[in-house]
Every structure is written in C-alpha cells, then in structure tokens.
Amino acid sequence: MKNFIYLLAIVLLLSCAKKEDKFPTDPNLEAKIDSIVKPHIDKTEAAGIAVGVFRNHKPLFQKAYGYADLELDVKLPVTASFEIGSVTKQFTAASILQLAEQGKLTLEDDLGKYLRFNTRNRKVTIRQLLSHTSGIKGYTELPSFEMLSIEKHSRDTLLRIVEKEQFDFEPGEALIYNNTAFFMLGLIIEKVSGMSYEEYVKKNLFDRAGMTNSYYCSENKITKNRAHGYDRNEKGLVRAAYLDHTWPFSAGSLCSTVGDLEKWNNALHHGKILNEKSYKEFLTPVSLNDGTVTRYAKGITVTDWKGKRLVEHGGGINGFLSQNSYFPDEDVSIIVLINTTSVGPRQIADKVADLIYKDLQVNKPAHFQGDPAKFAGNYKGRGRGEDVVVKISKNGLSLLATIGNGKPQPLNYIKENLWTDGSTNYLFKQQGGQITELGMDQVYGYLVLKKSSNL
C-alpha cells in the first residue's frame, strides 16, 4: 500500500511538471520580443513602448523601449505610468458590480433612477450601459466634443448636450461602442457610493489589488514616472493634443503601469475584486433583444484567439494606446502600453502571444457547400458615429466584404450563415428564404445592417 501511494505521488508530480512544461522559459524570448518592438522605435513610429508578459503572477518578461520624453531624451522606464484610455472601462464595470453585490443597485435598474436624462420614454438599463447596447449617442463622435474636450465645465453639461441627440438604435437592438454610457456609469457610482469616482476606484480597486502606481489621470498635475504622450502627423511625432480629464472620466481617465495592470488581472481573475456570481456576470457576453450573443461582456471582451480563451480590452486616448490581454486557462497576461497613437498595441500583444503559444494548431477554414451568391448585396445600417455600407460580393466559392471605400477583404466560411475575415464575424439572417440582414460582430460592436440591394 505504501508503495502504491508513493507511486501515485510520483505520477501526480510528473503530471504537474508536464503541465508546467507547456511554458518553458525561452532563452531567446527577449531577443524575439525585441525584434517585434524595436523597429517601431527605430523608425520613430512610437516614442516609447512598455511590454510585460506574466504567468501565474510571475514575470516572464518586462521591458521598456524608447523614451518617456523626447524633448529631454528621457528613457522610458518599465515602471512608467501611461494613460490607459478605455482599459478604464473594466474598472468602472467592476465598481458597478461591487455596488450590485452590496444591494445598492441592480443591473436592471433604469438609468433614470439615478440620473436626469431624457430618454424619450425609453427604458435604458445599467446592463445596457455596461455593454454598449443602450442606443444613446456617443459623445466622442459628436462634432461639438472637439471644442468641449479642451474646456472645463460641470459633467452635467455633457448629459445636456447628448440628450438632445437622437438614439442610434432602440435599446438592446445592437451594440455600438459608446463612451457616453460609461461616463454615465461613473456618475451612478458617485451617486450610489457617496464617493468621487477617483476615491471609489482607489479604495475599492487599486488598494485591494496592490496597485500603488495607478491613479486618476490629470492634465496638469506633476506625477513622477509619468510618460508624456505623442501623436503623429505627416511630419513625424508631435506632442499629444490637450484633453481635459473632466470628460474621459470613467470611460477612459485612469493611468497605470505594466506591473500594476498585471496586479489588476491577478486580483480581478482570482476573486479579490468580485465574488463568484459577480465575476461570472462580469464575463458573460451580452445578448441582444433577438437573442444574438455578442463577444462583449461588461467593460471587457471575451473572445477566442487561435483556439485559446482570451479576455481583453484595448484603449486609446490623446497620446496613448494600451492593450491588456489575459488568457484565463493558463493565467497568462500580456500587457502593452505605448505613449504614441500610431502603433497598434493589440498587434504587438498578438505577436508576443504567438511566441508564448508557439505550437498552436489553427483550424483550417471550412468550405461552403452551395452558391454563395445568395449572400451578395449591399447592406446598410448605423455604425459608430456614422452610417455604414458594406458590399458583399461573390468571389468564386467564397465571399469578399468591402466596407465603405475600403479594400475588399476575403471572408472564410465558418458554418451555416456565418463567415469571418479573421476578426469580424459576418452573420447573415434570412426571412422567407431570402437573405435580408447582416449582423457584423466586430467584438467591440455588433452592427445590424439591412440588405438594401442585390448585386
């Protein structure tokens, strides 16, 4: 019996070791990531880039490239803080879910219970604010926001401007990325908690996660180790345009570091921020009124990346871009922060993920059986800040999708009436045997486009 127990222990140890071997330390990992990131610095496409790769709360790689300040030639430290833009949204969503845990609100509450806002007799729920399905006009897409963004007014000013606008769609009918909704959620947090958004997030999120280098951004406060932001024009890099942080607010005004965002992932996904029920709610993708399941949950997306579950969100704000990718099955975080708006952090994160998951087998595209001509036509509907027209054309036994005046993109068949270009999924819906509608699942949006003509 003792020998059996001994052998069983050995087997268990070996199985655990084998599991750990899925992520052996690559002695060339730094050189490989250098080859991905450094060209952007060398070509002056970005001022600075910070990258962190973590597994089980331990760093596999952390490094900063380029500069925190170009004018003074200040090198970028890996501990530098960046404006993280819309990565802020997951903090706002977690705050709302905490308040729901405490019984101070429910996700089905009408926003009118907390804010004065004319919805023209529509019910808009907190759940719909969290998932971009409210239909309320996004303020960052309004022409008037360019001037407002550099001015300081009461936050109520923004609500009065937006409520004059027509809804983009009826609540729950589509998903269009919406900063107004998350701005409203910040106001609800303040009203329900009796604290400022800045105070609430620090006490209930940052402090719990041990995020000592994260804070509410400021356009004028001097903050040690803060990277300066840059944009790019036809002549090269320029200083980022001014933005008053009254306005990004709970939709995009938090600042953080690579290390702190890993602490956030560790706390959020291991029960330190939300209870089990709330965490499940946090990660449940929203369904539209017709039952269509999207890939956007609450301030965060839940997707599939080359067969791996991926929980992620990116951010963009004047002078800064960010990406926080978390692979829950292996407890892997890949975080990319850039103090320039001309290089895609998601593309860098995905290339780094390719190094970590180097032996993934990607499924080959399926083949559509039949004539794809039935899908061809022009489809039109509301997009983010503008109407969207998509031309679907037959390409042999496959399809091409052309959005506006863009280049045609090949679509791969998945199943039934579902196709994809690799990131956006195209779901064709039919009625009476005829294709009448196209649902474009862009992850950060789900657009409903009506077929306007055949080809």
Image (tube, rainbow, N blue to C red):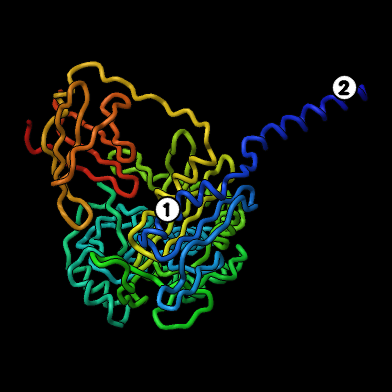
Which x, y percent locates residue 202? 54, 71
Q: Residues within 10 Å of mark 2 (few under 14, many from 20)?
A: few
Is 113 left, or right, of 278 in this rendering? left
Tell me the quadrant of the picture where the C terminus can be found: top left
Q: Which of 430 and 423 is in front in this view?
A: 423
Q: Which residue is under mark 2? A: 4
Which x, y percent locates residue 185? 39, 65
Q: Which residue is under mark 1? A: 313
Q: What element carries label 1?
A: strand
Distance between mark 1 and mark 2 Cα atoms: 48 Å
Q: Residue 144, relative to residue 97: is it above or below?
A: below
Is 217 left, or right, of 110 in this rendering? right
Is 67 left, or right, of 370 in this rendering? right
Q: Is residue 197 visible?
A: no
Amino acid carrying mark 1 in the image: His
Q: Which of 135 and 253 is in front in this view?
A: 253
Q: Is mark 2 on a helix, strand or loop?
A: helix
Which x, y percent locates residue 234? 23, 64
